Image: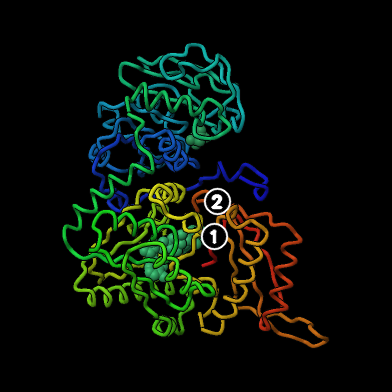
């Protein structure tokens, strides 16, 4: 991407995987199946999510499911093919995830990648063993026989590996296709049974023929039509929304962010004036944001918009609340109470549209033992007694795909390329303490300066997000020969593709200096500015 991310790490760093216990129904997508799908089973690999993204980039819809889902869950989706991801375990480790042999009997081709291949080989009676030396990073693949899977690729090619266990013998019925520096069998296939395996990672950019091999699997082997694109989700969703909503009234929580704007446009396309948008100004917005959103939206679109001034009730609700999850849940619940009141006013709207994305769903954990990193207000933060039925047309998409849909729908660039802003707003950036009006105002002032300077420097669009955090800390300073005891502002700026992983942005020193000095000079309460240089993982983007 940019001068801001000096390493390639961000493009490789999709480190998410679905924790065991993730309830699958949370992830199931109501699709009017119009396009072909390939399911990726996640064995906890670092790049599992990247596999699904690559498949989508190649024009085939793809969903990532935890490895332990039953065969029925996979069958339900009528996939054209199945991909088994890599994973951190050794196939011999106690409790290592197993491959259910029934998955190999679905009548669709299966491609095992790294751990996925090792599990396949072990299940079918081949030989996998821990090698003396591992094979990490760049390696050389030597193809003995191209077979079906490696057709059209060179006899020797670079590939990217990350494993210690190694396949020494292919199971009966398989042909070993290639070896690598440290792996006697680095690719194999049993065309008859439709089973394929590769030890290397086709999904990372360091495997030059990776996309080629994936394309072969999708197109030639699985026979999937490459007709899916973020844009054709429009027709699919318009149809699904009509079916779900019928002739009921619908409200849409509209923040002015790209997700809810796109969701609103889709729903409007589907059910026209049954839709009313509701913008909630909870007092945790950025400077002048409320007015800007209302003006921009009313100017641009012909969708009725109700703006609710809810600052007082949100501040009241947050009194004494400092623990991050408690804060998120309080905000999530209050949002719903406001939506309920507005729904009643417009005449019993039973449906609530939200711009929930795939990453919100994955990250919110789920509940049955899965790790919840943080409850996104629109997923894990919803109150139990909510009666709305949710309409979430973007639940299957990643942010870059939503942007593509937005562009296709004619959403102006300034909406499409807005940096994300979390629903709970500045409240989760007043860290370690209560979000009082006074602290929110200080943070708002700092944030305004940061945005202003980032835009002036022409960096706004290159950054996934740039914002300030106000910890509950004061430090001693000396200003005008006087002792001061003021707040610390932290600057957080990150690059990312989809918020699942992120790197801290290398902002120019001169810009940082300009930002810091403006903050200290212009905001009386602030006397120190620090920079957050934590990537995600191990950090998250927001501090709470
Ligand atoms: N101030 C708000 N008023 C009404 N609805 C909101 C508000 N903030 C968030 N929401 C609802 O919560 C959903 C999730 O918020 P989120 O911030 O993830 O998306 P967004 O604001 O639409 O887009 P972006 O991620 O670009 O900020 C929104 O799509 C919207 O439906
Ligand atoms: O609408 C939202 N409601 C939330 O509760 C919420 N929490 C985090 N975020 C945004 O999600 C992305 C990932 O954030 P984290 O790395 O902090 O988990 C980042 O873009 C965050 O700004 C939220 N958005
Ligand atoms: N990347 C992987 O899937 C690694 C598989 C297994 N953990 C190994 O080390 O061989
Ligand atoms: Mg937002």
Quick check: marks 2 and 1 in contact, CB under 8 Å? yes
**Of helix, strand and loop, which one carries label 1?**
loop
Q: Earlier in the sequence, mark 2 or mark 1?
A: 2
Which of the two residues, 247 or 76, is positioned nearer the viewer here? 247
Which of the two residues, 48 or 280, is positioned nearer the viewer here? 280
Q: Is mark 1 within 8 Å of ligand 2?
A: yes
User: Residue furthest toward the right?
Assistant: 481
Picture coordinates of residue 154, whole percent (x, y): 55, 16
For residue 218, which quarter of the picture?
top left
Q: Quadrant of ligand 4?
A: bottom left
Q: In which quadrant of the rendered image does the N terminus lie? A: top right
Q: Which residue is mark 2?
A: 496
User: Residue furthest toward the left?
Assistant: 247
Picture coordinates of residue 30, whole percent (x, y): 25, 48
Q: Residue visible at 37% across and 43% down?
A: 231
Q: Residue visible at 46% across and 55% down?
A: 412
170 up-or-down from 333: above or below? above
Q: Is mark 2 within 8 Å of ligand 2?
A: yes
Residue 369 in view of the camera:
no
Q: Which residue is mark 1?
A: 541
354 up-or-down from 66: above or below? below
Which of the two residues, 262 or 218, is positioned nearer the viewer here? 262
């Amino acid at each position: 991407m940019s001068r801001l991310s000096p390493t390639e790490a961000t493009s490789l760093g999709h480190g998410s995987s679905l924790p065991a216990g993730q309830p699958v129904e949370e992830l199931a997508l109501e699709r009017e199946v119009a396009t072909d799908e390939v399911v990726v089973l996640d064995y906890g690999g670092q790049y599992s999510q990247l596999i699904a993204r690559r498949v989508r980039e190649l024009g085939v819809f793809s969903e990532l499911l935890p490895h332990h889902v039953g065969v029925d869950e996979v069958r339900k989706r009528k996939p054209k093919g199945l991909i088994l991801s890599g994973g951190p375990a050794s196939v011999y480790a106690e409790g290592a995830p197993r491959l259910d042999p029934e998955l190999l009997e679905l009548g669709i081709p299966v491609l095992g990648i790294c751990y996925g291949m090792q599990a396949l080989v072990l299940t079918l009676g081949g030989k996998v063993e821990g090698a003396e030396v591992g094979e990490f990073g760049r390696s050389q693949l030597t193809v003995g026989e191209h077979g079906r899977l490696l057709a059209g690729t060179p006899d020797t090619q670079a590939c990217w590996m990350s494993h210690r266990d190694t396949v020494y013998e292919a199971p009966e019925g398989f042909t070993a296709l290639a070896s690598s520096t440290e792996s006697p069998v680095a690719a194999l296939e049993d065309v008859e049974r439709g089973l394929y395996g590769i030890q290397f990672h086709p999904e990372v950019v360091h495997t030059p023929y990776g996309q080629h091999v994936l394309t072969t699997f999708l197109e030639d082997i699985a026979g999937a039509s490459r007709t899916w694109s973020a844009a054709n989700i429009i027709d699919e969703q318009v149809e699904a929304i009509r079916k779900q909503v019928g002739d009921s009234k619908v409200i849409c929580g509209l923040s002015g962010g790209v997700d809810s704007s796109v969701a609103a446009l889709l729903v409007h396309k589907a059910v026209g004036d049954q839709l009313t948008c509701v913008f909630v100004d909870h007092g945790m917005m950025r400077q002048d944001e409320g007015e800007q959103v209302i003006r921009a939206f009313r100017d641009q679109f012909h969708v009725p918009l109700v703006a609710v001034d809810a600052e007082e009730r949100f501040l009241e609700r947050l009194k004494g609340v400092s623990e991050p999850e408690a804060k998120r849940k309080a905000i999530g619940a209050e949002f719903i109470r406001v939506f309920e009141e507005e729904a009643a006013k417009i005449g019993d709207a039973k449906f609530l549209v939200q711009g929930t994305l795939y990453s919100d769903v994955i990250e919110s954990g789920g509940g049955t033992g899965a790790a919840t990193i943080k409850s996104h207000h629109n997923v894990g933060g919803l109150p139990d007694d909510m009666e709305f039925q949710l309409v979430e047309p973007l639940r299957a998409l990643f942010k870059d795909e939503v942007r593509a849909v937005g562009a296709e729908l004619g959403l102006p660039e300034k909406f499409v390329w807005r940096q994300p802003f979390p629903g709970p707003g500045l409240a989760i950036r007043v860290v370690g303490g209560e979000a009082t009006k006074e602290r929110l105002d200080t943070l708002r002032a700092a944030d305004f300066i940061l945005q202003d300077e980032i835009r002036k420097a022409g960096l706004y669009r290159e950054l996934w997000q740039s914002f300030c955090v106000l910890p509950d800390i004061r430090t001693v300073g000396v200003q005008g020969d006087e002792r001061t005891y003021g707040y610390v502002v932290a600057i957080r700026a990150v690059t990312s593709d989809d918020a699942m992983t992120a790197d801290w942005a290398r902002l120019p020193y001169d810009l940082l200096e300009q930002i810091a000095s403006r903050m200290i000079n212009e905001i009386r309460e602030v006397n120190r500015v620090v920079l957050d240089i934590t990537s995600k993982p191990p950090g998250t983007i927001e501090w709470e």
